[in-house]
Amino acid sequence: MKFMKVNMTDQTIKLEDVPQDYMGLGGRGLTSIMINKEVPPKCDSLGPENKLIFAPGLLSGTSLVNTSRISIGAKSPLTGGIKESNAGGTVAAALGRLGITGIIVEGQAQEGDLSILRIDKEGKASLIPAQEYRGMRTYQFVEKILETYSKKTAVLCIGPAGEQRMPLASIQSSDIDGRPCRAAARGGLGAVMGAKGLKALVVDQGGKSADAIADPKAFNEAAKVLAKIIKEEFINVNMMGPLGTAGLVAPLNSMGAFPSFNATKGVLDGWENISGEAMAELIKKRGGNTTHMGCAQCVIHCSNIFVDKKGKYVTGALEYETIWSMGGMTGIVDLDTIAQLDFLCDDIGVDTMSTGVAIAVAMDAGHKKFGDGKAAIEMVKEIGKGTEFGRILGNGPAAIGKHFNHARVPVVKKQSVAGYDPRAMLGHGVTFATTPMGADHTAGNLVGLYLTQQLDPLKSEGQVEASRFIQIAMAAFDVMGLCFMASVALLTPEAGEAFLKVLNAKLGTQFGPDDFPGAMGIRVLKAEKEFNRRAGFTKEDDRLPRFYYEEPLPPHNTVFSITDEEIDSTFDF
Amino acid sequence: MRVKLYGTLSQQFPDYRHSEGIEVEIPEGTTVKDLLARLEISESQGALVAMEGRILKADDKIRCGVPVNVLQAIHGG
């Protein structure tokens, strides 16, 4: 259990034991609790006082399956509040195998300096000058890094958008095949990394100094039980493996909740052309891969490899949120165009969701026509080039709305909503409004409850309670490094019991069902709310944009009907 | 009535063409449960029936002439 403290001002690296205050924390728990304690809430997010924290999950690097999420945290340049964004890939397991609990990047390099933080398989770290990589896009960069070091290197890096400190900049994460197609995309953490003067974190995957497990026998037994539960969970078998998250396109359109044409319709004309089913058929026909292992130790394989007509790689893991933002919101019903947009965003290093929504706002304002794929591609390219318009776009949907004096801007705390319209799925409106992260799909997603008819998406009753429950659960699972698909498979009593056995065997603790996920999730959310409050956020920031209350969404023609009082009761702890 | 299949449900219908869907003759009063049984779709497949923007309950009756989508449950991602 070690912290690696990297001071970019004086270019020093120190290893220290994890202090008592942070023991038993990983992932989002570590990033959020540390930011709340150590980062001045009113600081400049792109200045030396901000800290950029890389934290593998508490279980990353162990033998437990699907624990390869890395949490990255800082004060967000997009929202001005606390931010945790997590990504799959290979780096979380690599750090876990080195016994590194967190890397805390502090201070700021001199203007113009750029470095790579490299950690070898013995855990030795160094800052390496990276001027030769300045301005380089992520695919080329990772290719060069793998050539320079080894194919078994895990990479987190920024592209031109991060170096230009744009609030939509992502941190890209390399997958099993060494492609930077996973992303800690939300909240502009790539801009924080760029402002620190850090191009990449490069970690050898061959580490063999993982933290000791308190009771290895009990851990292995329970981990086997969990692996079976996660692998055999019916949604993972039926949908996540064969279609991935793209399988959501059909249900969302069938429920009239697929925000389309900048959130003016709940069903996209031509959605069948960009559904998960259509995508899988196209990929198979062209010789791509519909069921791909993207992250270390994954047994679900929700990833895919999208290829062009000649069978050549275009992008990895074309996922629901990107299909929605780049297709639904923009009215582009062509998978090849969407795949190209996905690749460009990963390569330049920007969030596909907020970028797609920003393009949709520009189209809605009349800048270009809905459905104009070529225009969308040119707009994203402008971000990479850093043109004047590209820089406005790279500031996000709110900046684009301001530029065009256009009011229909679907953001909360300046971060774009996700692909679930709050007027047709009321609980998502509660989550978007209240999560300390700004509107976000991973903070508390209720679509599974709606589809399994545990909750009516159009009735107010039960939405706040459901959002509260799932937000607490997700905040807790984000501590562990588990992916979303694995986490939801663990919400049954049987799986919950097995998970507690794993956790207690790992840490030597006696946690019960009240401790996890409940108390753990609440502790994380309280820290996040506290930081935002001290940063100046009030309950007025926990509101959806006015148009959700005023413009009915076809086909249900309903508006968002949860009252402010109900919204404010979401975090009643 | 015309039924369209989503998720991986079409795999059990070798001649299924999505543009056409499946033509199923059902008597008045057919419920969601009846339709799924008729299509030999088992509970473990997590099938759901959507009609007019709503997910129907197992005992809800299906209205003849209205397009029906048979989906599979999925979590948000």
Image (cartoon, helix red, strand yellow):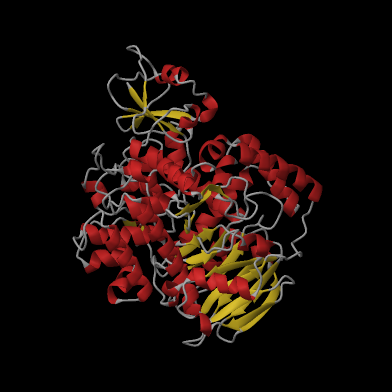
Taking the spot 61% from the left edge, 70% from the top edge, the residue there is A146
Q: Nearer the viewer, residue B32 or A314?
A: A314
Placement of B50 over or under A510, stated as above or below: above
The residue drawn where x is 76% and y is 43% is A221
Please indicate, yes or no, whether residue A108 appears anywhere in the rendered image: no
Q: Would residue A56 be found to the left or right of residue A474 on screen?
A: right
Residue drawn 41% across the image and 64% down it: A345
Give A372 or A521, whichever is nearer the viewer.
A372
Residue A436, percent from left and from top:
44, 58
Residue A454 coordinates in the image, percent (x, y): 45, 32
Report x, y in % for residue A437. Answer: 44, 59
State which quarter of the image contains the N terminus of chain A.
Answer: bottom right
Position above or below: A564 against A10:
above
Give the image location of residue A403, x and y in percent.
Answer: 23, 69
The total number of labels drawn is: 0
Instruction: Decide if residue A342 is in sight here.
Output: yes
Name of the residue lying farthest toward the front? A310
Q: Quadrant of residue A161?
A: bottom left
Q: Is residue A349 left or right of residue A1?
A: left
